[in-house]
Image: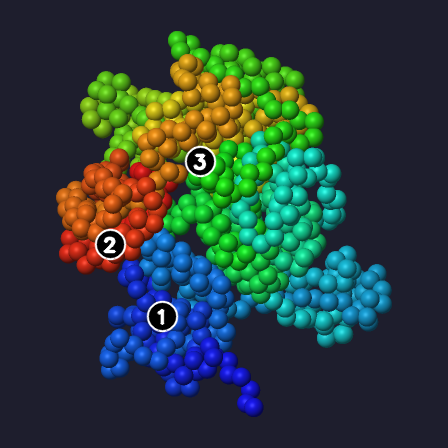
Amino acid sequence: MSAPTDAPTAALQRATIARVAVPSPLNQLFDYRLPDRCAVEPGMRVTVPFGRSTRTGVVVDCRRDSELAPERLKPIHAVLDETPVLPAELLGFVLWASRYYHHPPGEALATALPVLLRQGAPARPQQQSVLRQTAAGATVELSELARRAPRQAELLALLRQAGGQLTADGLGGLRASAKALAEKGWLQIEQRPAYGFVPAEAALQPPPRLNSHQAQACAAVRERAGFACHLLDGVTGSGKTEVYLELVADAVDAGRQALVLVPEIGLTPQLIRRFSRRFRVPIVALHSGLSDRERLNAWLAARDGLAAIVIGTRSAIFTPLARPGLIVVDEEHDLSFKQQDGFRYNARDLAVVRASRLGIPVVLGSATPSLESLANVERGRYHHLRLPQRAGAAGMPAIQLLDIRSKPLHAGLSDPLLARMREHLDRGGQALVFLNRRGYAPVVMCHDCAWTGTCNRCDARLTFHRHDRRLRCHHCGHERPLPPACPSCGNGELFPLGQGTERLEQELAARFPEHGIVRIDRDSTRRKGAMSRLLESAQRGEGRILVGTQMLAKGHHLPEISLVAIVDADQGLFGTDFRSIERLAQQVIQVAGRAGRAERPGEVIIQTHYPDHPLLHTLLRDGYAALARQLLDERRQMALPPYAALALLRAESPTAEPPLVFLEEARQQAEALAPDGVELMGPVPAPMERRAGRFRAQLLLQAARRQNLQRLLERWVDRLAQLRSGRRVRWSLDVDPMEML
């Protein structure tokens, strides 16, 4: 009897056509002719002719025939991989996401690949030189060698301090000494892959004893085998990270890998330190702060199963895992998990989908869970795990509203607030002053003619940045110097109106000159490593006053902070987006949670002109959970997410008319296809119609059932690509939009 045939392999060997996902705006795959005697599998990269260029694509399927005539098929230029660079699981997952978000598969797969792989680089890690002391080198008397060759003695001493082995990175002038020692047989120079593992801490920290709520949460995850989605709903400071660490330890002990997602790059350093103090296993980080080579090295370490723990931001959801065991999404409510341009995916939602496809647990953690996650708990899809109290002896901070109506303000700071800051600082505490607006002032105005600085490319005012006396648009990046006089009347004096973090810093420095101030916003953290340095300065107590934007509100452990001051809580009370109240509440609770995280009791003061606002009172009196239930009831009655599904079709062009024309034609196409229960709203100009020199408009689709909306989108998107009016605009489809701007 003959041996059984491997059917898939045999089919691939007989294939003569490869279906390739090529990075392009076209929502389709492209057929190419395979070279003779060429073995190609799905997940491999190939270079192919595309129009007048050559591009790197990913093989999605192999077959024997094509809808195109043989003479029309172009040949593949080159096969770049010997084995699939994208494992079958990840390839299928990305293609699923491409279909759900109705984004071209070539661009979706390109998003999932590190930049160097998109450019056709080999899927191999960078090599590094490793110096290893030999047995003969270990017997060398350093003092005697130092008299003849001091640099060689210095290098041998470094090797011995490092336990007999170190990498050649950073040797500088000692490289020649390494070569000389190798010739003497006192050390060996080896080439090894440089996967970019996180350096281990000097000493491991034993895990703390979990409190009863933490232990119950871990037990609840362990008792459900296979896929389950758990919402870890814990107040700020309740020890959610300890639960993550415990569950990651379970995965690592079982020989599995854990993927941990955080919303922003600023949160990765402290989380990496926590993990490197707990585990003696390879850990890699994946975020935009890495070089292209570093990112590829870490990606390959995860794919090849060498990295046991992967910690990364949004795009890390596309990391290949050889032995997946657990996915964690920290601060799951955070808007940063949603990609706002290009491939508009939501990493939090994709984490749940990927865990389901892999058959592993996923944990979503937050002190202020999103209404979408709470609705999934309500429907029985997610398991609700609660941490209702802070870990250790820390108590929840006292929160109070401060009515600033009719009170004098100094750069937005009231006298009662400044007095409370003085009291906390005198007792040795730290104060965090929060304002989610960077720069010095959001507006500059002429006192004589009321001219204000506006952006030439956006429907927005320019923000004044005092440190370099420039006006900047925070929407498109346009900037120009502050004029010496009013550009309109020529003789008016320009006054800054309102306040940003720069102005708060200046005012506080004048009032508290004896205390150091640390400002953390996008401007102060532009340079690599700046965020970590500023936070370390604050943790050492060098800055007794912290001033910052939402970057300070997320997950940072600052144990000496006893007072949190929210300068302006009114920004989100009257927003045009239906999610504005939810986001305001999350922001208030997250910022307030920085206070009183250790032995010092915490206090939170919220300045407002609307102290009687019912939603603020619900939040402060009954907590976030009560407000979330109220908001969910409102969403249900209004048929808004999470009780409805949305898709937003956007269009833009250098002039105002083409986007509206295209969207009107798109609406007519949708009306002909739409099943019952799908409502079309628009087209209308975007809330900020002109941005970066382009006019924008949008068409909103809303459906009570997600299946109906997806059924429409599947047929509609192909028709949109055929509209002639679409050639005059740049358009995009955003499924499950998180911002309506």
Q: What element carries label 2?
A: helix
Q: Can residue 76 be seen in this view?
A: no
Q: How far apart are marks 2 and 1 (CA)?
A: 23 Å
Q: How far apart are marks 3 and 1 (CA)?
A: 39 Å
Asked if residue 241 lies left or right of residue 731, the reply is right
Query: Which numbered dot is residue 716?
Result: 2
238 lies above or below 73: above
Residue located 40% across and 61% down the image: 95
In the picture, residue 563 is in which quadrant? Answer: top right
**Along the line of sight, the residue nearer the viewer: 248 or 494:** 248
Q: Where is residue 255 in the image (x, y as percent from the top left)?
A: 66, 59
Residue located 40% across and 47% down the image: 339
Residue marked by disc 3: 371
Q: Is residue 400 visible?
A: yes
Q: Is mark 1 on a helix, strand or loop?
A: strand
Residue marked by disc 1: 20
Mark before the other along the chain sequence, 2 or 1 = 1
What kind of residue is marked 3?
A: Leu
Asked if residue 513 lies left or right of residue 638, the reply is right
